[in-house]
Image (cartoon, coloured by chain):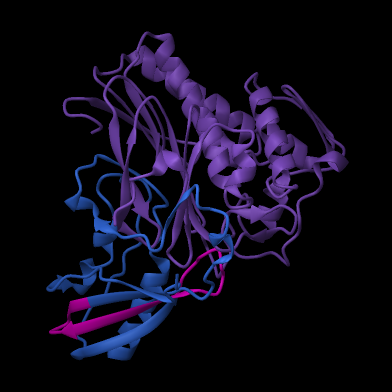
Chain colours: A blue, B purple
Protein backbone atom coordinates (compact mmCIF):
# COMPACT_ATOMS: atom_id res chain seq x y z
CA UNK A 1 0.00 0.00 0.00
CA UNK A 2 1.31 3.44 -0.75
CA UNK A 3 0.59 6.34 1.49
CA UNK A 4 -0.64 9.41 -0.33
CA UNK A 5 1.34 12.43 0.73
CA UNK A 6 -1.09 15.06 -0.40
CA UNK A 7 -4.79 15.13 -0.16
CA UNK A 8 -6.95 17.60 -1.96
CA UNK A 9 -10.20 18.69 -0.43
CA UNK A 10 -12.41 20.75 -2.66
CA UNK A 11 -14.40 22.90 -0.30
CA UNK A 12 -15.36 25.90 -2.33
CA UNK A 13 -18.10 26.74 -4.73
CA UNK A 14 -18.35 29.28 -7.48
CA UNK A 15 -19.79 32.66 -6.66
CA UNK A 16 -19.20 32.77 -2.92
CA UNK A 17 -18.55 36.25 -1.71
CA UNK A 18 -15.24 36.70 0.06
CA UNK A 19 -16.89 37.90 3.25
CA UNK A 20 -18.98 34.80 3.68
CA UNK A 21 -16.67 32.11 2.44
CA UNK A 22 -15.17 31.09 5.76
CA UNK A 23 -18.25 31.59 7.88
CA UNK A 24 -20.00 29.17 5.60
CA UNK A 25 -17.90 26.38 7.08
CA UNK A 26 -19.93 26.26 10.29
CA UNK A 27 -22.00 23.10 10.36
CA UNK A 28 -25.58 23.98 11.13
CA UNK A 29 -26.29 20.61 12.68
CA UNK A 30 -24.17 21.32 15.72
CA UNK A 31 -23.91 25.03 16.21
CA UNK A 32 -21.69 24.86 19.25
CA UNK A 33 -18.19 26.06 18.52
CA UNK A 34 -18.17 29.51 17.02
CA UNK A 35 -16.34 29.52 13.72
CA UNK A 36 -14.02 32.37 13.06
CA UNK A 37 -15.00 34.46 10.14
CA UNK A 38 -12.70 36.27 7.83
CA UNK A 39 -14.02 39.62 6.76
CA UNK A 40 -12.57 40.80 3.52
CA UNK A 41 -13.36 44.07 1.90
CA UNK A 42 -12.28 44.47 -1.68
CA UNK A 43 -11.35 45.41 -4.30
CA UNK A 44 -8.91 42.68 -5.25
CA UNK A 45 -7.14 41.84 -8.45
CA UNK A 46 -8.44 38.87 -10.36
CA UNK A 47 -6.24 35.82 -10.41
CA UNK A 48 -5.34 32.63 -8.65
CA UNK A 49 -3.51 32.93 -5.34
CA UNK A 50 -1.89 30.32 -3.15
CA UNK A 51 -0.73 30.45 0.44
CA UNK A 52 0.03 28.03 3.21
CA UNK A 53 -1.63 28.29 6.60
CA UNK A 54 -0.47 26.54 9.71
CA UNK A 55 -2.50 23.48 10.35
CA UNK A 56 -2.70 22.97 14.10
CA UNK A 57 -2.30 19.26 13.99
CA UNK A 58 -0.74 16.90 16.47
CA UNK A 59 2.26 16.79 14.16
CA UNK A 60 3.06 20.39 14.80
CA UNK A 61 4.66 21.20 11.50
CA UNK A 62 1.82 20.51 9.15
CA UNK A 63 0.24 23.08 6.93
CA UNK A 64 -2.77 23.51 4.75
CA UNK A 65 -2.27 24.89 1.29
CA UNK A 66 -5.08 27.20 0.24
CA UNK A 67 -5.60 28.20 -3.36
CA UNK A 68 -8.17 30.86 -4.16
CA UNK A 69 -9.29 32.06 -7.53
CA UNK A 70 -10.60 35.60 -7.40
CA UNK A 71 -12.73 37.23 -10.03
CA UNK A 72 -14.56 40.48 -9.47
CA UNK A 73 -13.55 40.45 -5.77
CA UNK A 74 -15.37 37.20 -5.15
CA UNK A 75 -13.94 33.75 -4.74
CA UNK A 76 -14.71 31.67 -7.78
CA UNK A 77 -12.78 28.61 -6.64
CA UNK A 78 -11.23 27.33 -3.42
CA UNK A 79 -8.93 24.39 -3.11
CA UNK A 80 -7.44 23.20 0.15
CA UNK A 81 -4.52 20.81 0.15
CA UNK A 82 -3.42 19.14 3.34
CA UNK A 83 0.32 18.54 3.31
CA UNK A 84 0.63 15.46 5.43
CA UNK A 85 4.30 15.44 6.33
CA UNK A 86 4.24 12.68 8.84
CA UNK A 87 2.75 9.63 7.15
CA UNK A 88 2.29 6.90 9.64
CA UNK A 89 2.80 3.40 8.43
CA UNK A 90 4.01 1.66 11.52
CA UNK A 91 0.69 0.19 12.54
CA UNK A 92 -0.12 -1.47 9.25
CA UNK A 93 1.34 -4.75 10.37
CA UNK A 94 -0.58 -6.97 12.69
CA UNK A 95 -3.82 -4.99 12.44
CA UNK A 96 -5.73 -7.16 10.01
CA UNK A 97 -8.42 -8.15 12.43
CA UNK A 98 -9.35 -4.51 12.71
CA UNK A 99 -10.30 -2.40 9.74
CA UNK A 100 -8.11 0.01 7.84
CA UNK A 101 -9.22 2.65 5.39
CA UNK A 102 -6.42 3.90 3.16
CA UNK A 103 -8.01 7.35 3.00
CA UNK A 104 -11.05 8.77 4.69
CA UNK A 105 -13.54 10.24 2.26
CA UNK A 106 -15.55 13.34 3.05
CA UNK A 107 -19.12 14.06 2.12
CA UNK A 108 -20.91 17.34 2.63
CA UNK A 109 -23.00 17.35 5.79
CA UNK A 110 -26.02 18.68 3.97
CA UNK A 111 -25.89 15.73 1.58
CA UNK A 112 -26.30 13.14 4.31
CA UNK A 113 -29.38 12.66 6.40
CA UNK A 114 -28.18 13.34 9.94
CA UNK A 115 -29.24 15.56 12.78
CA UNK A 116 -26.18 15.20 14.98
CA UNK A 117 -22.46 15.53 14.40
CA UNK A 118 -19.65 14.14 16.56
CA UNK A 119 -16.25 15.57 15.97
CA UNK A 120 -13.71 18.23 16.46
CA UNK A 121 -15.42 21.38 15.28
CA UNK A 122 -12.06 22.37 13.95
CA UNK A 123 -11.31 26.03 14.19
CA UNK A 124 -10.56 27.15 10.69
CA UNK A 125 -7.66 29.24 11.88
CA UNK A 126 -5.15 27.77 9.47
CA UNK A 127 -7.52 28.45 6.64
CA UNK A 128 -8.13 31.98 7.85
CA UNK A 129 -4.40 32.68 8.14
CA UNK A 130 -3.87 31.63 4.55
CA UNK A 131 -6.77 33.81 3.46
CA UNK A 132 -5.21 36.76 5.27
CA UNK A 133 -1.97 36.22 3.38
CA UNK A 134 -3.85 36.03 0.11
CA UNK A 135 -5.71 39.24 0.95
CA UNK A 136 -2.46 41.14 1.35
CA UNK A 137 -1.05 39.65 -1.85
CA UNK A 138 -4.12 40.52 -3.83
CA UNK A 139 -4.30 44.16 -2.80
CA UNK B 1 -33.56 18.37 16.53
CA UNK B 2 -32.70 14.78 17.27
CA UNK B 3 -35.89 13.17 15.98
CA UNK B 4 -38.81 14.93 14.28
CA UNK B 5 -41.12 16.44 16.87
CA UNK B 6 -38.68 16.13 19.76
CA UNK B 7 -37.91 19.01 22.09
CA UNK B 8 -34.47 20.38 22.79
CA UNK B 9 -33.24 21.94 26.03
CA UNK B 10 -30.06 23.90 25.32
CA UNK B 11 -27.67 25.52 27.77
CA UNK B 12 -23.98 26.23 28.35
CA UNK B 13 -22.01 24.36 30.98
CA UNK B 14 -18.39 23.49 31.85
CA UNK B 15 -17.20 25.50 28.88
CA UNK B 16 -19.26 23.87 26.17
CA UNK B 17 -22.74 23.88 24.68
CA UNK B 18 -25.29 21.25 25.66
CA UNK B 19 -28.48 20.03 24.10
CA UNK B 20 -30.79 17.54 25.75
CA UNK B 21 -33.41 16.14 23.39
CA UNK B 22 -36.55 14.40 24.61
CA UNK B 23 -39.89 13.45 23.03
CA UNK B 24 -41.78 15.68 25.52
CA UNK B 25 -40.73 19.10 26.70
CA UNK B 26 -38.86 18.90 30.01
CA UNK B 27 -40.67 20.23 33.07
CA UNK B 28 -39.26 23.33 34.73
CA UNK B 29 -38.17 21.42 37.84
CA UNK B 30 -36.33 18.83 35.73
CA UNK B 31 -34.52 21.60 33.89
CA UNK B 32 -33.57 23.22 37.16
CA UNK B 33 -32.32 19.88 38.46
CA UNK B 34 -30.15 19.36 35.38
CA UNK B 35 -28.64 22.84 35.64
CA UNK B 36 -27.96 22.27 39.32
CA UNK B 37 -25.96 19.13 38.55
CA UNK B 38 -23.95 21.04 35.95
CA UNK B 39 -23.20 23.85 38.40
CA UNK B 40 -22.15 21.40 41.13
CA UNK B 41 -19.82 19.66 38.71
CA UNK B 42 -18.24 22.90 37.58
CA UNK B 43 -17.77 24.13 41.14
CA UNK B 44 -16.07 20.86 42.06
CA UNK B 45 -13.78 20.24 39.11
CA UNK B 46 -13.16 23.42 37.16
CA UNK B 47 -9.52 24.44 37.20
CA UNK B 48 -10.63 27.70 35.61
CA UNK B 49 -12.40 29.09 38.68
CA UNK B 50 -10.78 30.01 41.95
CA UNK B 51 -13.63 28.75 44.13
CA UNK B 52 -13.55 25.18 42.81
CA UNK B 53 -12.42 22.25 44.93
CA UNK B 54 -9.55 21.35 42.61
CA UNK B 55 -8.29 24.94 42.65
CA UNK B 56 -7.55 24.48 46.35
CA UNK B 57 -5.05 21.77 45.42
CA UNK B 58 -3.35 24.12 42.99
CA UNK B 59 -2.71 26.65 45.75
CA UNK B 60 -0.81 24.20 47.91
CA UNK B 61 -0.66 20.73 49.46
CA UNK B 62 -3.88 19.64 51.05
CA UNK B 63 -6.91 17.41 51.01
CA UNK B 64 -10.26 17.94 49.33
CA UNK B 65 -13.42 15.87 49.34
CA UNK B 66 -14.91 15.66 45.88
CA UNK B 67 -18.47 14.56 45.03
CA UNK B 68 -19.31 10.86 45.29
CA UNK B 69 -18.81 10.31 41.55
CA UNK B 70 -15.10 10.99 42.02
CA UNK B 71 -14.48 7.36 42.90
CA UNK B 72 -15.48 6.39 39.35
CA UNK B 73 -13.01 8.92 37.97
CA UNK B 74 -10.37 7.54 40.32
CA UNK B 75 -10.77 4.00 39.00
CA UNK B 76 -10.86 5.09 35.39
CA UNK B 77 -7.85 7.40 35.60
CA UNK B 78 -5.81 4.86 37.58
CA UNK B 79 -6.43 2.19 34.94
CA UNK B 80 -5.61 4.51 32.07
CA UNK B 81 -2.54 5.91 33.85
CA UNK B 82 -1.27 2.35 34.09
CA UNK B 83 -2.21 1.31 30.55
CA UNK B 84 -0.66 4.40 28.98
CA UNK B 85 2.51 4.25 31.07
CA UNK B 86 1.74 7.60 32.69
CA UNK B 87 0.96 9.39 29.45
CA UNK B 88 -2.67 9.90 30.40
CA UNK B 89 -2.88 11.51 33.80
CA UNK B 90 -5.21 13.80 35.75
CA UNK B 91 -2.08 15.71 36.77
CA UNK B 92 -1.71 17.10 33.27
CA UNK B 93 -3.18 20.47 34.30
CA UNK B 94 0.20 22.04 35.05
CA UNK B 95 1.54 21.00 31.66
CA UNK B 96 -1.51 22.50 29.99
CA UNK B 97 -1.10 25.75 31.89
CA UNK B 98 2.57 25.80 30.92
CA UNK B 99 1.61 25.72 27.25
CA UNK B 100 -0.89 28.51 27.73
CA UNK B 101 -4.14 26.64 28.31
CA UNK B 102 -4.73 27.94 31.81
CA UNK B 103 -6.90 30.13 33.94
CA UNK B 104 -6.66 33.28 31.89
CA UNK B 105 -6.58 31.53 28.50
CA UNK B 106 -3.26 33.23 27.80
CA UNK B 107 -3.02 30.86 24.83
CA UNK B 108 0.68 31.39 24.51
CA UNK B 109 3.39 29.16 25.88
CA UNK B 110 4.79 30.27 29.22
CA UNK B 111 7.94 28.20 28.72
CA UNK B 112 9.22 24.86 27.57
CA UNK B 113 6.80 21.95 27.96
CA UNK B 114 6.91 20.40 31.41
CA UNK B 115 5.94 16.80 32.12
CA UNK B 116 3.18 16.15 34.62
CA UNK B 117 4.31 15.16 38.11
CA UNK B 118 4.13 11.43 38.74
CA UNK B 119 0.90 10.33 40.40
CA UNK B 120 2.75 8.18 42.93
CA UNK B 121 4.94 11.12 43.93
CA UNK B 122 2.33 13.77 44.69
CA UNK B 123 -1.21 12.40 44.73
CA UNK B 124 -3.26 10.11 46.94
CA UNK B 125 -6.75 9.58 45.54
CA UNK B 126 -9.09 7.27 47.44
CA UNK B 127 -12.73 7.44 46.48
CA UNK B 128 -13.89 11.01 46.85
CA UNK B 129 -10.92 12.11 48.95
CA UNK B 130 -7.91 13.52 47.15
CA UNK B 131 -4.72 14.62 48.87
CA UNK B 132 -1.68 16.22 47.33
CA UNK B 133 1.75 16.67 48.82
CA UNK B 134 2.59 19.53 46.47
CA UNK B 135 0.58 22.12 44.56
CA UNK B 136 -0.99 20.21 41.66
CA UNK B 137 -3.29 21.25 38.85
CA UNK B 138 -5.81 18.45 38.71
CA UNK B 139 -7.46 18.20 35.31
CA UNK B 140 -10.12 15.55 34.90
CA UNK B 141 -11.17 17.01 31.55
CA UNK B 142 -10.41 13.82 29.65
CA UNK B 143 -13.34 12.08 31.34
CA UNK B 144 -15.21 14.92 33.00
CA UNK B 145 -17.45 15.98 30.16
CA UNK B 146 -18.42 12.36 29.64
CA UNK B 147 -19.14 11.85 33.30
CA UNK B 148 -21.36 14.91 33.36
CA UNK B 149 -23.24 13.51 30.35
CA UNK B 150 -23.83 10.34 32.39
CA UNK B 151 -24.90 12.32 35.46
CA UNK B 152 -27.47 14.27 33.43
CA UNK B 153 -28.73 11.02 31.91
CA UNK B 154 -29.19 9.71 35.44
CA UNK B 155 -31.28 12.77 36.32
CA UNK B 156 -33.52 12.09 33.32
CA UNK B 157 -33.88 8.41 34.15
CA UNK B 158 -34.65 9.36 37.75
CA UNK B 159 -37.69 11.26 36.58
CA UNK B 160 -38.90 8.33 34.47
CA UNK B 161 -37.64 9.59 31.11
CA UNK B 162 -36.22 6.70 29.09
CA UNK B 163 -35.97 8.21 25.61
CA UNK B 164 -33.39 10.97 25.28
CA UNK B 165 -30.17 12.19 23.81
CA UNK B 166 -27.71 14.14 25.96
CA UNK B 167 -25.32 15.93 23.61
CA UNK B 168 -22.35 17.87 24.99
CA UNK B 169 -21.18 19.32 21.66
CA UNK B 170 -20.41 16.04 20.02
CA UNK B 171 -19.93 13.78 23.03
CA UNK B 172 -23.30 12.17 23.54
CA UNK B 173 -25.35 9.48 25.22
CA UNK B 174 -28.39 7.95 23.56
CA UNK B 175 -31.22 6.13 25.29
CA UNK B 176 -34.38 4.80 23.71
CA UNK B 177 -35.92 2.54 21.14
CA UNK B 178 -35.08 4.51 18.03
CA UNK B 179 -31.40 4.56 16.99
CA UNK B 180 -29.83 7.87 16.00
CA UNK B 181 -27.67 8.48 12.96
CA UNK B 182 -24.66 10.63 13.87
CA UNK B 183 -22.19 12.08 11.40
CA UNK B 184 -18.47 11.76 12.09
CA UNK B 185 -17.04 15.19 11.45
CA UNK B 186 -14.18 15.41 8.97
CA UNK B 187 -11.09 16.31 11.01
CA UNK B 188 -9.90 18.77 8.39
CA UNK B 189 -13.21 20.22 7.25
CA UNK B 190 -16.17 20.81 9.57
CA UNK B 191 -18.54 21.11 6.63
CA UNK B 192 -17.95 17.46 5.83
CA UNK B 193 -18.37 14.10 7.48
CA UNK B 194 -16.22 11.03 6.91
CA UNK B 195 -18.96 8.61 7.88
CA UNK B 196 -22.20 8.02 9.71
CA UNK B 197 -22.59 5.84 12.77
CA UNK B 198 -25.81 4.50 14.22
CA UNK B 199 -25.99 5.17 17.94
CA UNK B 200 -28.35 3.10 20.04
CA UNK B 201 -28.44 2.92 23.85
CA UNK B 202 -24.89 3.99 24.42
CA UNK B 203 -22.33 6.75 24.27
CA UNK B 204 -20.39 8.18 21.36
CA UNK B 205 -17.47 10.47 22.04
CA UNK B 206 -14.95 12.22 19.84
CA UNK B 207 -11.57 13.71 20.50
CA UNK B 208 -9.53 15.74 18.09
CA UNK B 209 -6.18 17.37 18.52
CA UNK B 210 -7.28 20.48 16.71
CA UNK B 211 -10.48 21.09 18.63
CA UNK B 212 -8.96 23.57 21.03
CA UNK B 213 -5.74 24.44 19.32
CA UNK B 214 -4.09 27.79 19.73
CA UNK B 215 -0.65 27.66 18.15
CA UNK B 216 1.81 25.67 16.10
CA UNK B 217 1.45 22.15 17.35
CA UNK B 218 0.15 23.31 20.71
CA UNK B 219 -3.12 21.65 21.41
CA UNK B 220 -4.82 20.28 24.47
CA UNK B 221 -4.02 16.59 24.16
CA UNK B 222 -0.69 16.27 25.92
CA UNK B 223 1.54 13.32 26.69
CA UNK B 224 1.99 13.40 30.46
CA UNK B 225 5.45 11.83 30.30
CA UNK B 226 6.84 14.68 28.21
CA UNK B 227 4.30 17.49 28.58
CA UNK B 228 4.26 17.84 24.81
CA UNK B 229 1.32 17.55 22.45
CA UNK B 230 0.75 14.07 21.06
CA UNK B 231 1.70 13.51 17.44
CA UNK B 232 0.28 11.67 14.46
CA UNK B 233 -3.31 10.90 15.47
CA UNK B 234 -5.71 13.58 14.24
CA UNK B 235 -9.07 12.44 15.56
CA UNK B 236 -10.61 9.57 17.47
CA UNK B 237 -14.12 8.32 18.10
CA UNK B 238 -15.29 5.77 20.64
CA UNK B 239 -18.52 4.04 21.56
CA UNK B 240 -19.05 2.56 25.02
CA UNK B 241 -21.79 1.98 27.56
CA UNK B 242 -21.04 5.16 29.47
CA UNK B 243 -19.99 8.55 28.19
CA UNK B 244 -17.36 8.79 30.92
CA UNK B 245 -15.52 5.75 29.56
CA UNK B 246 -16.06 6.69 25.93
CA UNK B 247 -14.74 10.19 26.59
CA UNK B 248 -11.62 9.01 28.41
CA UNK B 249 -10.89 6.27 25.89
CA UNK B 250 -11.14 8.74 23.00
CA UNK B 251 -8.26 10.63 24.61
CA UNK B 252 -6.37 7.47 25.56
CA UNK B 253 -6.39 6.40 21.89
CA UNK B 254 -4.00 9.28 21.24
CA UNK B 255 -1.49 7.76 23.64
CA UNK B 256 -1.64 4.02 23.27
CA UNK B 257 -2.44 1.19 20.91
CA UNK B 258 -6.16 0.33 20.95
CA UNK B 259 -5.29 -3.30 21.62
CA UNK B 260 -3.92 -2.34 25.03
CA UNK B 261 -7.16 -0.56 25.95
CA UNK B 262 -9.34 -3.35 24.56
CA UNK B 263 -7.83 -5.71 27.11
CA UNK B 264 -9.60 -3.87 29.93
CA UNK B 265 -12.46 -1.96 28.32
CA UNK B 266 -15.51 -2.91 26.30
CA UNK B 267 -15.58 -0.30 23.58
CA UNK B 268 -15.46 0.39 19.86
CA UNK B 269 -12.95 2.76 18.37
CA UNK B 270 -12.01 4.68 15.25
CA UNK B 271 -8.69 6.49 14.75
CA UNK B 272 -7.90 8.89 11.92
CA UNK B 273 -4.25 9.71 11.32
CA UNK B 274 -2.69 12.89 9.97
CA UNK B 275 -1.98 11.23 6.62
CA UNK B 276 -5.69 10.60 6.18
CA UNK B 277 -5.83 6.89 6.79
CA UNK B 278 -8.13 5.37 9.37
CA UNK B 279 -8.18 2.31 11.56
CA UNK B 280 -11.20 1.00 13.41
CA UNK B 281 -12.62 -1.83 15.44
CA UNK B 282 -15.55 -3.98 14.42
CA UNK B 283 -18.06 -1.58 16.00
CA UNK B 284 -17.18 1.05 13.40
CA UNK B 285 -17.25 -1.38 10.48
CA UNK B 286 -19.18 0.08 7.58
CA UNK B 287 -19.47 3.57 9.06
CA UNK B 288 -16.86 5.29 6.90
CA UNK B 289 -17.68 6.62 3.44
CA UNK B 290 -15.70 5.06 0.64
Residue B136's place in the image compared with B129, above or below, is below
Q: Nearer the viewer, residue B125 or A91?
A: A91
Residue B281 percent location from the top left of the image: 47, 44
As rendered, which of B106 and A45 lies closer to the eye? A45
Residue at 25%, 32% in the rendered image: B2
Pick the residue in front: A59 or A72: A59
Specify the quadrant that holds the C terminus of chain B. bottom left
Q: Is residue A139 visible?
A: no
Magenta-drawn segment: A54-77
Quadrant of the image occupied by residue B17:
top left
- Say left or right for A126 vs A66: right
- Give the residue displayed 41% in from the left and 81% down from the top: A52
Say above or below: B288 vs B173. Answer: below
Number of marks in picture? 0
Residue at 70% x, 48% y is B92
- Do we see residue B64 in this rendering? yes
Judge whether A64 appears above or below B243 on screen.
Answer: below
**Image-based side of B185 in relation to B115, left or right:** left
Q: Quadrant of the N terminus of chain B?
A: top left
Q: Residue B144 falls in which quadrant of the image?
A: top right
Spot occupied by residue B282 in the image (x, y as percentages of width and height): 44, 41
Q: Is residue A119 magenta-colored?
A: no
B229 in relation to B285, above or below: below
Residue B32 on image: x %, y %: 41, 18
Residue at horizontal 31%, vertical 64%? A37
Q: Look at the image and say whether residue A58 sits in the magenta stretch.
A: yes
* Percent of width and height locating residue B227: 71, 58
Q: Nearer the viewer, residue A107 or B225?
A: A107
Amino acid sequence: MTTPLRKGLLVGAAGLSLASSVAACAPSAQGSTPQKTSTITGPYKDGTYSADGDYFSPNGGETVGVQLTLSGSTISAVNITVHANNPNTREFQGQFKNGIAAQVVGKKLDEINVTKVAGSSLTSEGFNKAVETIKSEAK
Amino acid sequence: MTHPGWNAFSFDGIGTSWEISTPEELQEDVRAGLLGVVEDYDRSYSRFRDDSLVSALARGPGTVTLPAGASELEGLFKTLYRLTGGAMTPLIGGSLERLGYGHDYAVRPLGHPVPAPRWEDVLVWKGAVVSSSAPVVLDIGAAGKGQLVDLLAAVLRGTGITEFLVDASGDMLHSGTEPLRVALEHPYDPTQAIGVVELHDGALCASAANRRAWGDGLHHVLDGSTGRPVETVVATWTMAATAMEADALATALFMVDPKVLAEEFEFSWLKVYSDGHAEYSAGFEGTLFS
